[in-house]
């Protein structure tokens, strides 16, 4: 073969490689459609009486030039049956001084009514006290009524549910009045003494008062390994209405920029562990050693540093374990961090395996996420809210941010070195993902088909069967936007729901786990004390069954008691009280 | 007696140092399959094409440097490997295909990265922040880099670029406003370490005279500044360029300068 021929062949291979790049890139850009079956949701917030609009915080003028970036947090939603009427209620937070949070009581007729002010949980955003960033419900005194912890950039507030439609602020006597810049909290009973303990995460350092800044050196020191964030705090419930800070003795005082936490027994040793999603750093798993101390696990998480925003727990393939989904950032051309879908192999291999691809990995600038069986087929689907700052759609802050993103930490740690954001958007106008779980075939995005078309800046997602129909509905709190309620509209598949009531365990049953045999698999869920991004699902557990065999239900209470139930009827809610 | 070490091997040492330090401290690779794929394809392509087209297997130092550079710089969507494989092949093959008067025009890794970010932006981004934004680590690499650039007789290229970058940063600050440190910040990051020590200094793809090399690298810095201003003023049709201004500036200026230099020398 002549040299010219050889050269022509190499040239053809070179061109073919470039064509292959274009073709493969085209496949990456598109999302798979045509799943056949889908999910049906309808946005009914206004029609349901929910007209809540989040307002962002106004900060010290020293950071005015990037205030839109710093203050783009605080839209939260959490679910609880506040008045024990058997219907889930909703609590939303806002972040502007003088603006009221909202407590929407379920009117049992498809509508809600805001009673926050008269209940005493509305006016919490006050100068000198800070602004709301989120809230979690838990019956800390086991009196049968869900109490409320509002975490803030400021002093957290604990509200005792008096059971008569009113709440009492008990922060001062609780020992929780500690200034934090927090964006997350979870209730869980780490020492299994039957009392709910509290883990509050720190984002910005706790010495920062955003309305009286002493310095502008408040930002992260690294984009991928920062540990100069606020310290997370663990408060042990002493049982007399007081909490004691046991952070250091328990070894859970991470100063990474934690945005979200979730608690569950990941390694099946019977003790609830803590999983943290950290901004500007790797995720962290703190394994609980019999309530005596926590240990930071090496579980395959430390090699992968991204921008963790939310921790969603779900048994993705009905293997009887808690898998983890953590949201991150993707922006075409600039950054592909990708969300993490981590399958739990802690018992077998001592680690999680990251398996996210395609639409699961790249959702945009992803925030809140939750698993829930939206079509009752027996597999947990995944809802992901996206979008950071939707402002001038013709201007993007990505380029300006990229200037400092690669720099030395001591440059961008000082907020005054950040380029002004002005009116620019930053990953704005993104749409949510509704990821239908098709088992081993993988997830497919059916958002458009499902009717989820909003382009608001989603933050918190909570799931609950709001109308007691055996269907999971989705509530979204949007930053500087109206809250959305996606009502699940059509499904005839079978289901079962469990409301667990603790006796020796905490009354809310937070941390209790139910494993349900569905067809050939078994799906495990945990009663939620706070998960996703600044959100909390209903305490009731919902299992879709499809047309599959419904076998036994195994409940593991946090007291250590295990209860096996057989022959439960399908298509109904079962209230199960822990054996005394 | 001073032992002369081929500058090529000093560069090999430096990029290996960057790889080892970065991986040990910050897991910069994002998984060893990426390194194995990129390095493997680069070395295999170099062996195959040099033997097939030129009748002898080329020295593999250049392919090694290209492979490491690509493994460090390419940040793909999710866990896909094809950008590493195809990027590596395209980089090495470009040396044999995109030639003029027997010389290749593009630095191989520069060509591959520029191509990927321009035509595959749904799948590939470039290293934007990594390595902990840590001053200590970067100072070590800068120190070794400057010494090795000096021994490799390319320090004038590196320093000219750095000086020009600083001057143009000041100019951008005056034009655009905003903090001066925001304009200076990029050059303190790891992507620029790879750029100033391994791409812009590549002796095989730069012009023949010392003065010419300094002029070319100054023009690269100027074009980079124009791209950056396009980013500041949000010129939409140039968006694909301002995800990585220095890489794309070099991809445009470098081959033109080489072509002009080869043509002038040929004449």
Image (cartoon, rainbow, N blue to C red):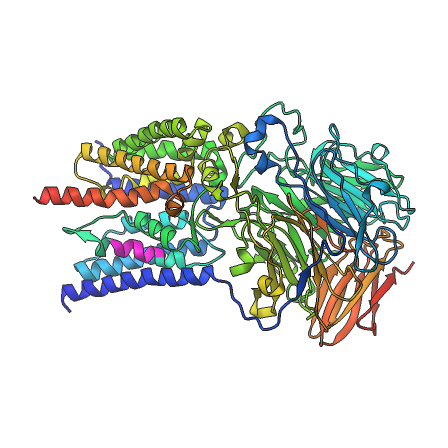
Would you identify the image quadrant in which residue A496 lies? bottom right
Q: Position of residue A442 (x, y in %)?
A: 57, 66
Front-most of residues A325 and B243: B243
Residue that protrudes farthest toward the front in the picture: A47
Looking at the rendered image, the quarter that the C terminus of chain A falls into is: bottom right
Q: Residue sitting at 23 percent across and 46 percent down?
A: B255
Q: Is residue A309 above or below residue A433?
A: above
Q: Residue sitting at 25 percent across and 64 percent down?
A: A12
Looking at the rendered image, the quarter that the N terminus of chain A falls into is: bottom left
| Residue A566 lies in the magenta stretch | no
A211 left or right of A195 in image: left
Q: Position of residue A317 (x, y in %)?
A: 64, 66
Instruction: State the predominant SS element of the stretch in magenta.
Output: helix
> What segment is highlighted magenta in the picture?
B87-94
Does residue A414 appear anywhere in the picture? no
Q: Is residue A470 above or below residue B262?
A: below
Front-most of residues B211 and B252: B252
């Amino acid at each position: 073969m002549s040299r010219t021929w050889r050269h022509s062949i190499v040239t053809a291979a070179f061109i073919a490689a470039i064509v292959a790049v274009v073709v493969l890139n085209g496949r990456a850009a598109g999302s798979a459609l045509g799943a056949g079956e889908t999910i049906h949701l309808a946005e009914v917030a206004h029609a349901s009486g929910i007209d809540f609009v989040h307002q962002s915080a106004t900060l010290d003028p020293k950071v005015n030039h990037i205030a839109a970036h710093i203050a783009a947090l605080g839209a939260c939603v959490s679910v609880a049956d506040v008045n024990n009427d058997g219907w889930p209620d909703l609590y939303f937070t806002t972040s502007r001084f003088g603006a009221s949070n909202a407590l929407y009581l379920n009117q049992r007729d498809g509508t809600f009514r805001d009673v926050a002010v008269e209940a005493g949980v509305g006016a919490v955003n006050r100068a000198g006290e800070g602004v709301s960033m989120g809230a979690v419900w838990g019956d800390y005194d086991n009196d049968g009524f869900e109490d409320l912890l509002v975490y803030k950039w400021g002093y957290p507030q604990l509200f005792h549910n008096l059971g008569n439609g009113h709440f009492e602020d008990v922060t001062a006597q609780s020992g929780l009045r500690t200034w934090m810049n927090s964006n997350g909290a979870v209730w869980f009973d780490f020492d299994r003494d039957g009392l709910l303990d509290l883990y509050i995460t720190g984002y910005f350092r706790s010495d920062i008062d955003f309305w009286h800044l002493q310095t502008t050196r408040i930002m992260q020191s690294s984009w991928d390994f920062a540990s100069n964030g606020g310290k997370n705090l663990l408060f042990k419930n002493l049982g007399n209405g007081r909490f004691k800070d046991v952070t250091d003795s328990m070894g859970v005082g991470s100063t990474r920029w934690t945005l979200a936490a979730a608690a569950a027994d990941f390694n099946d040793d019977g003790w609830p562990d803590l999983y943290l999603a950290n901004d500007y750093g790797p995720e962290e798993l703190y394994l609980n050693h019999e309530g005596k101390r926590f240990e930071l696990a090496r579980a395959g998480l430390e090699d992968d540093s991204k921008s963790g925003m939310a921790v969603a727990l779900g048994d993705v393939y009905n293997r009887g374990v808690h898998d983890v989904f953590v949201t991150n950032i993707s922006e075409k051309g600039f950054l592909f961090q990708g969300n993490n879908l981590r399958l739990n192999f802690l018992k077998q291999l001592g680690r999680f395996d990251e398996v996210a691809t395609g639409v699961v990995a790249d959702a945009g600038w992803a925030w809140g996420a939750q698993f829930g069986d939206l079509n009752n087929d027996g597999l947990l689907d995944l809802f992901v809210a996206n979008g950071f700052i939707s402002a001038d759609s013709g201007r993007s802050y990505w380029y300006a941010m990229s200037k400092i993103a690669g720099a030395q930490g001591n440059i961008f740690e000082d907020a005054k070195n950040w380029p002004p954001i002005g009116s620019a958007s930053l990953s704005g106008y993104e749409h949510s993902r509704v990821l239908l779980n098709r088992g081993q075939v993988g997830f497919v995005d059916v958002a458009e088909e499902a009717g989820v078309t909003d382009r608001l800046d989603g933050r918190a997602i909570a799931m609950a069967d709001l109308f007691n129909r055996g269907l999971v509905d989705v509530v979204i709190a949007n930053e500087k936007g109206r809250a959305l309620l996606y009502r699940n509209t059509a499904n005839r598949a079978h289901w079962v729901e469990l409301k667990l009531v603790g006796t020796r365990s905490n009354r809310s049953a937070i941390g209790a786990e139910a494993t349900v045999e569905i067809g050939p698999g078994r799906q495990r869920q945990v009663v939620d004390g706070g998960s996703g991004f600044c959100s909390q699902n209903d305490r009731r557990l919902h299992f879709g069954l499809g047309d599959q065999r419904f076998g036994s239900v195994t409940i593991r209470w946090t007291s250590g008691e295990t209860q096996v139930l057989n022959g439960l009827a399908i298509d109904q809610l079962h209230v199960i009280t822990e054996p005394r | 007696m001073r032992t002369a070490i081929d500058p090529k091997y000093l560069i090999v040492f430096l990029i290996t140092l960057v790889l080892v330090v970065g991986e040990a401290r910050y897991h910069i690779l994002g998984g060893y399959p990426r390194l194995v794929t990129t390095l493997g394809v680069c070395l295999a392509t170099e062996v195959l094409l040099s033997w097939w087209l030129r009748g002898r297997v080329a020295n593999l130092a250049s392919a090694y440097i290209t492979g490491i550079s690509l493994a460090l710089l390419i940040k793909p969507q999710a866990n896909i490997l094809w950008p590493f494989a195809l990027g590596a092949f395209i980089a090495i093959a470009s040396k044999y295909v995109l030639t003029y008067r027997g010389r290749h025009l593009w630095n191989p890794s520069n060509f591959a990265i520029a191509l990927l970010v321009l035509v595959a932006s749904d799948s590939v981004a470039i290293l934007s922040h990594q390595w902990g934004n840590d001053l200590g680590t970067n100072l070590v690499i800068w120190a070794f880099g400057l010494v090795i650039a000096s021994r490799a007789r390319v320090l004038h290229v590196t320093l000219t670029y750095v000086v020009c970058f600083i001057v143009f940063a000041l100019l951008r600050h005056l034009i655009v406003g905003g903090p001066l440190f925001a304009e200076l910040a990029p050059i303190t990051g790891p992507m620029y370490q790879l750029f100033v020590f391994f791409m812009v200094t590549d002796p095989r793809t730069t012009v023949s005279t010392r003065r010419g090399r300094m002029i070319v690298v100054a023009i690269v810095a100027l074009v980079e500044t124009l791209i950056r201003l396009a980013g500041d003023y949000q010129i939409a049709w140039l968006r694909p360029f301002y995800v990585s201004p220095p890489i794309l500036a070099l991809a445009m200026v470098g081959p033109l300068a080489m072509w002009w230099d080869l043509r002038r020398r040929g004449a």
